[in-house]
Image (cartoon, grey):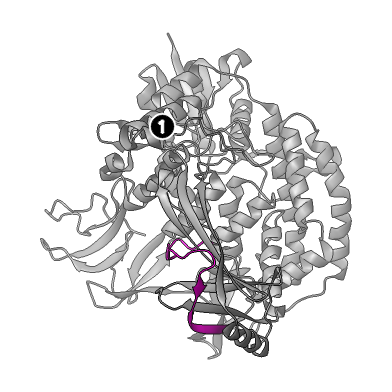
Amino acid sequence: MGERLVIVESAAKAKTIEKYLGSTYKVIASLGHVRDLPKSQLGIDIENNFEPKYITIRGKGEIIEKLKKASKKSEKIYLATDPDREGEAISWHLNNILKVDEDKIFRIEFNEITKTAVKNAIKNPRKVNMNLVDAQQARRVLDRLVGYEIGPILWKKVKWGLSAGRVQSVAMRIICDREEEIKNFVPKEFWTIEVAVKGYPNFILKLALCNGEKIEILNEEEANKIIDELKKGKFIVKSIKNTKRTKNPLPPFITSTLQQDAYKRLNYTTKKTMNIAQRLYEGVTIEGYGTIGLITYMRTDSTRIANEAQNSCRDFIALNYGKEYVPEAKRVYKSKKNSQDAHEAIRPSDVLLTPDKAKGSLTDEQYKLYKLIWERFVASQMASCEYDVKTIEVENGKYILKSSGSKITFDGFMKLYSYTFDNEDESFNIPSVKEKEELKYNTIDGKQHFTQAPPRFTEGSLVKFLEENGIGRPSTYAPIISTLLARKYVEKEKKLFIPTELGIIVNRIMETYFKSIVDIDFTADMENKLDLIENGNSDWKKIIKDFFSPFKENVDIAEKEVSKITIEDEVSDVPCDKCGRMMVIKRGRFGEFLACPNYPECKNTKPIVKKLNNVKCPKCGGDIQIRRSKKGRTFYGCSNYPNCDFVSWYEPVDETCNICGSIMVKKTSKTKGTYTVCSNAQCPSKEKSKVKNKSI
């Protein structure tokens, strides 16, 4: 039997899969896309029915030659890229580049990287799904048209380096609209009244109704009037209701809910969550298990669970928690409309591999995220939580006061994964009073309140809003947020998004000239059209054509009407060493830099130098600065260069080696996380660095 070639996207995934398939298979990573639209031009032949002009991505020549060479030697070629539109498109591009016989090349996919899943995929190959490819091409072309047509207008009229995006600009508008709501919000006064009951500590009655209608108290005068009436009347227990209720578990994670919960519970950004999840999916070496993908594919909007995984989980619950924790019927969760149900929810690949078993082989961050995913999945298959609710209604003339509390009688899924009860007091401070019993009061208090403005968005709440309104897809949320921050359209203050002046100006231009682009319904409808393409029910080029004609008209109008907008540059505390003016912060294609505001008379520029706090150069005691090499790689050097030649690829820390006295530096490993080692490559310590510092 000849060699068989499997092509995946990432090196980590290649390493994991190669261990499963044995010596007759060669697994090579394409390292993502190999072809794309050119960066230097639009790359779309508008006159030729929007035909994309794909080129080989710069720097991918070597890997392509390696793939071609391996494919010629191979009896069969399996394209094993990610199981989504983007992965399907990568497989299609690879198919076009390799140019091998159709009966020799196959597409395979798996939702989890386990030995069983990979071998089953090999047994069930298929051809590339062109509907999926066309949906990806439509998205790519749409995004390119929007970005490359609007971007130059923003560069010329506002500031160099700005961008607009089909989904990015909608997210920006949402943040700006919320800021406008907050700015225009007028607080309204209202009052509540609470009665502390004599003889029953912590028993509080809250005024709820007047003449059978929900009561609204608008000012102190009204509150005092009601309090006087209550004091004159009698508090008679009208009814006591005891009800049993159940609370069902939440479904297993999809991409958006994982991002939201990781943000809320672990304080992880969306980008960080996806990076860690990617590593867990691609494979980690676990003692006793070998190299294994710990979770299923992390870009999904489906809550579906495979029968085998569900059965295994139910057995695990019965064995470890008791049969009473297993619901009689299997739980089936309804995915949201238009979800890509071909994929499962995010779950552990093997429920028997508990977080505690994996802990010793994972970084702290990996462990926390895996634990979150594992617990959410197992809880989703457990019995409901049962609790008693006791509600007391007390009558005083035309007024009704209420008090309620709840008490868990069977924890069910909440034994593993709890969440709060909405609008209910989890305490159970309801005393054993009787109907028609008269209660006496200790105090009757009126409390002043004011309505609150809607809150600014956090990463978690923005993702939730985008998902609920059908804006973008699971894979887009993290890059959208990263772009808004990188372009300085928004800032974060105490984890809350606040639009900058620049963001507000760009949003104003978009709302004025490109209303459809930033319209929530229009954007959601475009996502539905992409779904139609994926399902084979629409032609992708027709959708592009229908979009482009009115869009191009708006571009032409904007180019003529948008006047030059001046945004003041941020003034630094660094004086120009040629003319003495305080330099300003500019943004160029390689990031931020300092420039003299006296341009063009003075053309002096400087890089923005950042230094490490509390760490001094081990050679001369100078500051250690964070710099970039000509190739853009970060390194650390002494501020007294060229008089001092200290330099390191790794970040120095304020510690010295207890063996040789050299400064210690930070290193990061996929298995160990971040740790410190001696910077001296010749140090006899076992902690010595295995990588020598090269000249920058």
Give residue 300's position: percent from left, percent from top.
57, 40
Give residue 292's position: percent from left, percent from top.
36, 33
Query: Would you say residue 351 is visible in this rendering?
Result: no
Q: Is residue 113 above or below residue 519?
A: above
Q: Nearer the viewer, residue 143 or 637?
A: 143
Is 436 covered by the magenta stretch? yes
Name the image quarter holding the C terminus: bottom left
Q: Residues within 10 Å of mark 1 (few under 14, many from 20)?
A: many
Give residue 537's position: percent from left, percent from top.
79, 30
Q: Main secondary structure of the magenta part?
A: loop
Which quarter of the figure has residue 486?
bottom right
Q: Residue furthest top?
A: 1
Name the image quarter holding the N terminus: top left
Query: Would you say residue 206 is visible in this rendering?
Result: yes
Q: Nearer the viewer, residue 406 or 657?
A: 406
Q: Is residue 109 left or right of residue 638?
A: right
Q: Is residue 648 left or right of residue 192?
A: left
Residue under circle 1?
Answer: 313
Which quarter of the figure has residue 677?
bottom left
Q: Nearer the viewer, residue 216 or 352?
A: 216
Q: Is residue 327 above or below residue 640?
A: above
Q: Is residue 639 left or right of residue 195?
A: left
Is 28 covered by the magenta stretch? no
Which residues fall within the magenta stretch?
424-448
Total of numbered circles in the picture?
Answer: 1
At 41% from the left edge and 32% from the top edge, which residue is drawn?
313
Q: Is residue 5 above or below residue 621?
A: above
Question: Label 1 amino acid?
Answer: Cys
Q: Nearer the viewer, residue 68 or 674?
A: 674
Give SS at disc 1: helix
